[in-house]
Amino acid sequence: MARRKEHTHGEIHDMAIKSVMEYLQTAKLESLSLRKVATQIGYAPSTLINIFGSYQQLLLSVSEQVLTDLYQQLSTAEIDSHPASELDLSSFNKGQAQKAIEQMAHQYFQFAHEHPACFKLVFELSAPEGIELSSNHQLAIDKLFNLIAEQLRVLFASANQADIILMSRVLWGGIHGLTCLAIDGKLFTEQAALPAMLSSHVHGYLLGMAQEKDFSCC
């Protein structure tokens, strides 16, 4: 076991989170415990309690890191681009915005497929009763939704902020649902069909909102 004060609290904090994420690459959360995490990093369980407050708070910190990693993957998603003339710039930007949302949807599934246990942890875990998520955790969630909101503002320039927030949640709710069904094997179709299904969902929702709200999307 590591000597007392061999690492700072910040280092132990990061070591514990990394240990949990690595464990979940090959095993299920149900088989993990605070004692196992402590043993893996060479410290006593009481040290982790002192740093995180509880095992659940440790898992919430892991959830926050997963959201941060997911943001990094979605924010670096690449889309094909071609030069556009000034006359075609508006249409070009809207086309790029829709492609960006599609690509983020595909990257979202890719992340979930590669890290299923960590992905599920984010959505199955909640803060202890009476305790709100940390400001950093909430910020990680907001940053993810803002990636979508930024593209929706390009597509629906006349929409107000409330409309954009609502659309981002509904649109991504469908993407999340398809993703969860796919990783659980409940789509009852070949997994290779999921990218087309995600794109279809994005196309259909954006077109529907353009018609329903009379926004200028396409």
Image (cartoon, rainbow, N blue to C red):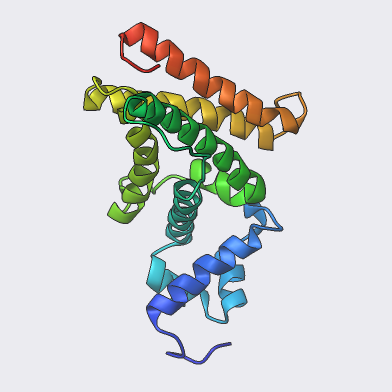
Rendered location of residue 86, percent (x, y): 32, 30
Quarter of the figure with residue 10? bottom left
Please give the name of the residue rendered at 34% of the width and 29% of the height, measured from the top-left corner. Answer: 89
The quadrant of the picture occupied by the N terminus is bottom right
Please give the name of the residue rendered at 77% of the width and 28% of the height, measured from the top-left corner. Answer: 190
Is 168 displayed left or right of 185 in the figure? left
Please give the name of the residue rendered at 63% of the width and 24% of the height, measured from the top-left corner. Answer: 197
Frontmost residue, 37 versus 17: 17
- 4 lies above or below 62: below
- 208 lies above or below 30: above
Is 157 displayed left or right of 105 in the figure? left
Residue 10, can we see it?
A: yes
Frontmost residue, 97 versus 152: 97
Residue 129, can we see it?
A: no
Frontmost residue, 190 versus 20: 190
- 100 lies above or below 46: above
Is 6 displayed left or right of 108 in the figure? left
Frontmost residue, 42 versus 161: 161
- Count of picture labels: 0
Quarter of the figure with residue 182? top right
